[in-house]
Amino acid sequence: MSRHLQGSLFDQTDQLSLGPLDGIRRTELALGAWIDVLPGWLSGSDVLFEQLAAEVPWRAERRTMYDHVVDVPRLLAFYGADDALPHPVLTQAREALSAHYAEELGEPFTTAGLCYYRDGRDSVAWHGDRIGRGAREDTMVAILSVGTPRDLLLRPMHGGGATVRRPLGHGDLIVMGGSCQRTWEHSIPKTARATGPRISIQFRPDGVH
Ligand SMILES: O=C(O)CCC(=O)C(=O)O
């Protein structure tokens, strides 16, 4: 299952470890939305990529688009609040995020959604995480990325603002917060460039999808 991953030149350790979250940098977006970004939060991230690619029970989904049924262009896995995560470092990451944002979020991160982008043809279209409470309430979605960086784009949902672009891979962390899921949307566009595989792990509080 694992596609060829060109490892990071800057992260050559096999030792998986999470850095402190104090260095995370916030960028305020318009309309009460913000993103926090911490490049290289996880060291040894190529090891985690290989393990997740090989061991997670990835699901290929299909969905109806107009009158066609099409493949969802990425592989997926979902871990509910009571499910054991596929690697202990992900449990540590979820605990560290829950502790760091406890006061601001007021509840822990509980679930983990995993997406596997096999190459540049895999993608996710513009959307906000608005199935559930994200449609009505401010919340947070924290995404840890491993493997080859791909651009995450963000834009205001109703237009009128510049698109924000953040390349994410090799252990990078982004947290989307405030009204981000309601007032902004995000995507991972396809790319024609030769691109290696990436896995994203999204931590969300209960009831946010
Ligand atoms: O892969 C990513 O970083 C974004 C994933 C995402 O937006 C989603 O699955 O809702």
Image: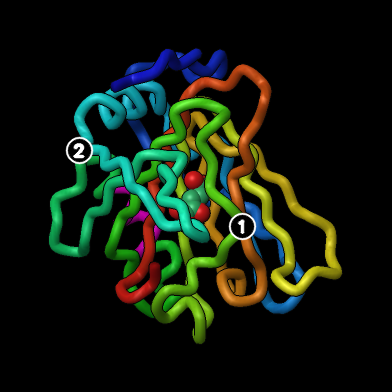
Rendering coords of residue 7 (x, y %): 48, 15
Rendering coords of residue 39 (x, y %): 58, 38
- What's under tag 2, amino acid-wise? Pro
Q: Which residue is mark 2?
A: 57
Helix, strand or loop status at disc 1: strand
Please state the extent of the stretch shown in magenta in the rendering: 92-98
Looking at the rendered structure, the number of numbered marks drawn on it comes to: 2
Q: In the picture, which quadrant includes the C terminus?
A: bottom left
- Compared to residue 207, the image places residue 118 above or below, namely above
- What's under tag 1, amino acid-wise? Trp
- Compared to residue 73, the image places residue 79 above or below, namely below
Rendering coords of residue 13 (x, y %): 40, 17
Residue extending farthest to the bottom is 136
Q: Which residue is mark 1?
A: 126
| 156 on left or right of 94 | right
| Mark 2 CB near ligand 1 (8 Å cut) | no
- Compared to residue 161, the image places residue 2 above or below, namely above
Rounded to the nearest angstrom, the CA distance separating label 2 from label 1 is 26 Å
Helix, strand or loop status at disc 2: loop
Residue 103 in sight here = no
| 114 on left or right of 174 | left
Picture quadrant where residue 4 is located: top left
143 or 191: nearer the viewer: 191
Mark 1: few, some, or many residues within 10 Å (few <14, many ≥20)? Answer: some
| Residue depicted at x 68% and y 77% | 32
Rendering coords of residue 61 (x, y %): 33, 47
| Residue depicted at x 39% and y 78% | 132
| Residue depicted at x 37% and y 57% | 203
Q: Along the polypeptide, which appears first: circle 2 or circle 1?
A: 2
| Residue depicted at x 67% and y 25% | 192
